[in-house]
Image: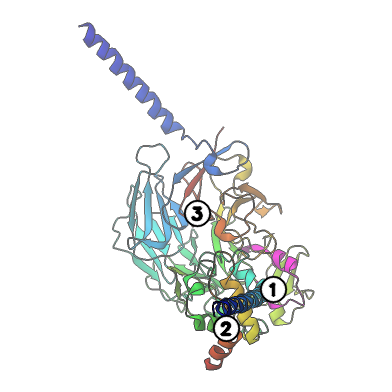
Amino acid sequence: MKKVTQILVFSSLFILVLLASTSTFAQKIKPDADNAGLTLPAGFAALKVADNVGRTRHIAVNKQGAIYAKLERLDNGKGIAVLKDTDGDGRVETKTTFANYIGTGIAIKGNYLYASSNKEVFKYALNANGDIVDENAAATLVTGLVDKGQHNSKSLTLDNAGNIYVNVGAPSNSCQEKDRTKGSMGMMPCPILDSAGGIWQFKVDQLNQTYATGVRYATGLRNVVGLDWNNELNQLFVTQHGRDMLNNLYPDMYDTTVSAELPSETMYAINKGDNAGWPYIYYDHFKGKQMMAPEYGGDGKKTVDDKYINPAMAFPAHMAPNGLLFYTGNQFPARYKNGAFIAFHGSWNRSPLPQEGYYVVFVPYENGKPTGKWEVFADGFSGKTVVKNPRDAQHRPCGLAEGPDGSLYVSDDVKGTIYRIMYQK
Amino acid sequence: MQRIFIVLVVVIATFVSATAQTNNKLVAASVARGKTIYLQRCMVCHQADGGGVPKLNAPLDASSTVNGSDISKLVKYIVKGLNDRIEIDGEFYANAMPAANDLKDQQIADVLTFIRNNWSNKAGPITLTQVKQIRSKLK
């Protein structure tokens, strides 16, 4: 009898402990002891939700917290990974894959998942659990987009009026007759802009749309990888990768230091019909001016005024803004609400200066406008104090997503680490 | 007879080592000239460590193509540039490589000799004669 009592006491104790621990997990997910190797502002913590998922470009998180990761390389023939935390500890236990194409873009809107290859855009229905209804029933929304290797990411975002916005990057540095070749002049007008170097708008409920049926929503954008719909302003925002190689192509006008620092990486607030000026201009954030591109008669001094839209924000050169997300959650302190997070993939063409980027930036907004100051929000992805050569970076931020609880997710396209950043009161 | 043999051996050895030294000196000079060209023309894309940029610009360090015996391919890439998407050691690289057709034969030999003998690369030098021969056959 005594033994039975003992067993009863112990087992009920055990159950109590178990209950206590599971309820703690449900309320609070434990960050990694080293914050996943990241440096964050005070009060924030991070964990690696998943590791070695495969080179992950953009990500989307459903209402249940499952992560859809768009892969840059096929994993056993599949290009989208579905990552699930089945025991509530915040870490991924199961990974399944589907879709037979690589690509960058992925987003969830309503009960649909949208994903892009480097030429097409697809749509999948989600059920009440946030799972794909039928992995093999992809509806092809858009086909025939330009893919010539260079700048071929088809990033996407959606508005609240049944439209999807897709970036088509220019397969070129500065629209020279011969790409990246010294002495080769810029083509006038730049013929690339007919089918690339801009944002195209398509309908979410029409199949097999093409350039002919879509709308060229904005042009003069060399290579946009980050784009997001700002719900507060009901407006499209994009981040552009500025041109390369001013010094290599025009050593008489630009020394290596100027070429490392220019042109700016830029974020634009886009209205239908806007032209941001590529390849004819680049932006100089030191002067706060649009500069005439040397391929089109510029000399490093000539400005172009009142012809093209100005950026909403400008950043140091070559840092490669690959992910843009307007934060709408309530988990982070109030100043983050409706501000912009940008994942900078990190530079390669700032040598002989050290490379820059490889971090996530926050851009505070006030009354629908950026305050003009940006700050490094999460650093340490590269695992190096200074990145001299891009191949040394252990991780490179690429995609951003907001979880249902307001956590910020960051993807890495070197090894496929998924980070989750949380604010801990 | 034996003495003559010894003298002969010494003479040949001296000659061979002198030639080797001259060769080493010539290669070293070629590497030095090649480095200057590399810094001006190649480094921005292929990087100071020859590691390239993942997915954009091919690495030269430890590259099977760079260290390989098909040197005509290397000369061709410099003279003609590279616009095709080709797989190198299991990876594709998105950026186009501009032609550097303005480089003289000696400069091409120098920069290739530098690239093939820098970082972890230990491939043979490339001579002016070789570049001349290959280039004359390129259309």
A185 lies left or right of A29: right
User: Residue drawn 58% across and 64% down?
Assistant: B119
Q: Amino acid at mark 1?
A: Thr
User: Residue drawn 54% across and 55% down?
Assistant: A396
Between marks 2 and 3, how big is the CA–CA gap?
A: 34 Å
Q: Amino acid at mark 3?
A: Asp
User: Residue A191: which numbered mark, if any?
Assistant: 2
A157 lies left or right of B113: left
Q: Which residues are magenta?
A: A245-269
Q: Amino acid at mark 2?
A: Pro
Q: Chain of mark 1?
A: B
Residue A193 place in picture, x, y as percent:
57, 79
Between marks 1 and 2, how big is the CA–CA gap?
A: 36 Å
Mark 3 packing: few (<14 Cα in 10 Å), some, or many (20+)? many
Instruction: Decide: is A177 above or below A420.
Output: below
User: Residue A412: which numbered mark, if any?
Assistant: 3
Quarter of the image for residue B57 reads bottom right
Question: Which is closer to the viewer, label 1 or label 3?
Answer: 1
Q: Residue furthest left?
A: A1
